[in-house]
């Protein structure tokens, strides 16, 4: 089959690793895959060499369309609200209908902010009015239920497709006692990045003196975390390593005693046989249990009942296990996570292709939505470019002591911009 994937940038994240794994698996199994990206990212180099890559976005797509006009794709696939609009724009310009796949990989991705931006409103309205339910793939039932509730629609005909992880052999190395690892963006809804600092402090007070917590990732919470670590005097126990190159994932985590987090990294750690505590989205220091206690394909979503198990208790329970109990815990976790393997997910994806909803030819009102979306996107792009040039000029003019103030202000602006456009797992 012939697939077209559309996305923004393959930086390090759960959805991005899914795109890399799925496109590479499809290529390895005889399918043709082309990916359109807005810009280069860290994971580009991990794509299978047979995957075709183009770099352009909705603001300059017209001049690149000719490269895609040879023959129709069996399916056009997108993986977040922004790429949904870009993919719909491309289908309109290609001028023939395509089976359409919209992957939805966060329970609030279409209604994240209390105050919507014009672009987010257009994306949501386009989803409601023009995207067939048979095109919608949700990462798990919790994600589908949250959209069903917000959109006031049954979403009948949609289906589930989880984040996929590569098949990883169970680790063989010895563990480092009481070493906790977390991997993921340091974004506000991942509240475990803040409350776990207090939990580490409490565990030390209660006799777990050798505990360490290694955090891989960057984002808006980093500065707040650093301040909290200093306040609790935990510089020798908590380490912020910054962004982790994906190829170093297994090496960095393989000796961990325990993993705390959400998303694909929780599952990938579980594939190694590392017990995990799911950090539930915005739920505070409580969870539903361990990784294998999650329902279906859940990876840290808030369900219709409050999590009631204190994360402190879950950590201490693992620390107090005998070797035999710990080995059994790791095996139980690994068996639960094997359902997320790329072989299982890829096979299901191919089978589902022929059942996807069809998009195109687009009616006039859909074309109008896309026209307005492109105009606003172009305006925002030019605004950001102008702001970037302004900051560069300030850097050459300001005395050195003021540069750090400027850098902090720039990070806050970028964080707000990222939150307003989309949030990634």
Image (tube, rainbow, N blue to C red):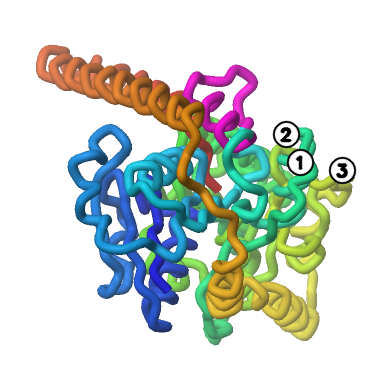
Q: Earlier in the sequence, mark 3 or mark 1?
A: 1
**Residue placed under numbered mark 2 in the picture:** 151
10 Å crowding of disc 3: few (<14), some (14-19), many (20+):
few
Q: Tell me if label 1 and label 2 are in contact, CB under 8 Å.
A: yes
Q: Earlier in the sequence, mark 2 or mark 3?
A: 2
- Residue 221 image point, x, y percent: 51, 34
**Residue placed under numbered mark 3 in the picture:** 306
- Residue 350 image point, x, y percent: 54, 73
Q: Is residue 126 magenta?
A: yes
10 Å crowding of disc 1: few (<14), some (14-19), many (20+):
some
Please name the residue shown 30% across and 44% down the image. 38
Please name the residue shown 60% across and 25% down the image. 113
Mark 1, secondary structure of its residue:
helix
**Residue placed under numbered mark 1 in the picture:** 148
Q: Is residue 342 left or right of residue 295?
A: left
Q: Which quadrant would the N terminus be assigned to in this image?
A: bottom left
Question: Residue lying furthest left in this view?
Answer: 396
Q: CA distance from mark 1 to mark 2?
A: 5 Å
10 Å crowding of disc 2: few (<14), some (14-19), many (20+):
some
Q: Tell me if label 2 and label 3 are in contact, CB under 8 Å.
A: no
Magenta stretch? 111-128
Between circles 2 and 3, the one closer to the viewer is 2
Q: Is residue 191 magenta?
A: no
Q: Is residue 155 above or below residue 384?
A: below
């Amino acid at each position: 089959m012939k697939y077209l994937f559309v996305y923004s940038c393959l930086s390090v994240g759960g959805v991005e690793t899914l795109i890399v794994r799925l496109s590479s698996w499809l290529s390895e199994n005889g399918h043709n895959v082309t990916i359109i990206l807005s810009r280069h990212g860290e994971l580009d180099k991990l794509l299978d060499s047979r995957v075709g890559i183009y770099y352009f976005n909705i603001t300059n797509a017209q001049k690149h369309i000719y490269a895609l006009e040879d023959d129709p794709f069996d399916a056009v696939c997108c993986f977040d609200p922004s790429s949904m609009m870009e993919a719909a724009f491309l289908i309109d310009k290609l001028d023939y209908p395509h089976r359409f796949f919209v992957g939805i990989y966060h329970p609030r991705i279409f209604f994240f902010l209390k105050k919507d931006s014009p672009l987010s409103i257009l994306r949501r309205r386009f989803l409601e009015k023009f995207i067939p339910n048979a095109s919608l793939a949700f990462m798990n039932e919790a994600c589908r239920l949250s959209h069903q509730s917000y959109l006031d629609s049954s979403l009948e005909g949609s289906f589930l497709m989880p984040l996929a992880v590569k098949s990883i052999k169970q680790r063989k190395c010895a563990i480092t006692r009481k070493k906790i690892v977390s991997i993921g963006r340091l974004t506000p809804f991942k509240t475990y990045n803040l409350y776990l600092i207090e939990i580490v402090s409490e565990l030390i007070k209660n006799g777990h003196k050798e505990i360490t917590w290694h955090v891989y990732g960057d984002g808006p919470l980093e500065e707040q975390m650093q301040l909290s670590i200093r306040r609790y005097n935990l510089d020798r126990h908590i380490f912020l390593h910054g962004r982790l190159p994906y190829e170093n994932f297994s090496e960095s985590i393989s000796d961990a005693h325990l993993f705390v987090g959400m998303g694909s990294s929780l599952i990938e750690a579980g594939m190694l046989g590392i017990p995990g505590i799911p950090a539930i989205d915005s739920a505070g220091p409580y969870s539903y249990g361990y990784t294998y206690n999650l329902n279906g394909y859940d990876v840290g979503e808030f369900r219709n009942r409050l999590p009631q198990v204190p994360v402190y208790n879950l950590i201490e329970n693992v620390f107090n296990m005998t070797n035999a109990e710990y080995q059994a815990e790791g095996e139980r976790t690994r068996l639960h996570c094997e359902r997320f393997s790329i072989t299982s997910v890829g096979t299901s994806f191919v089978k589902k292709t022929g059942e996807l909803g069809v998009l195109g030819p687009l009616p006039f009102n859909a074309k109008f939505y896309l026209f307005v979306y492109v105009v606003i996107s172009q305006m925002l792009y030019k605004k950001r470019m102008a702001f970037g040039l302004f900051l560069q000029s300030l850097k050459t003019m300001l005395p050195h002591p003021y540069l750090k103030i400027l850098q902090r202000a720039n990070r806050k602006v970028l964080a707000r911009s990222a939150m307003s456009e989309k949030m990634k797992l």
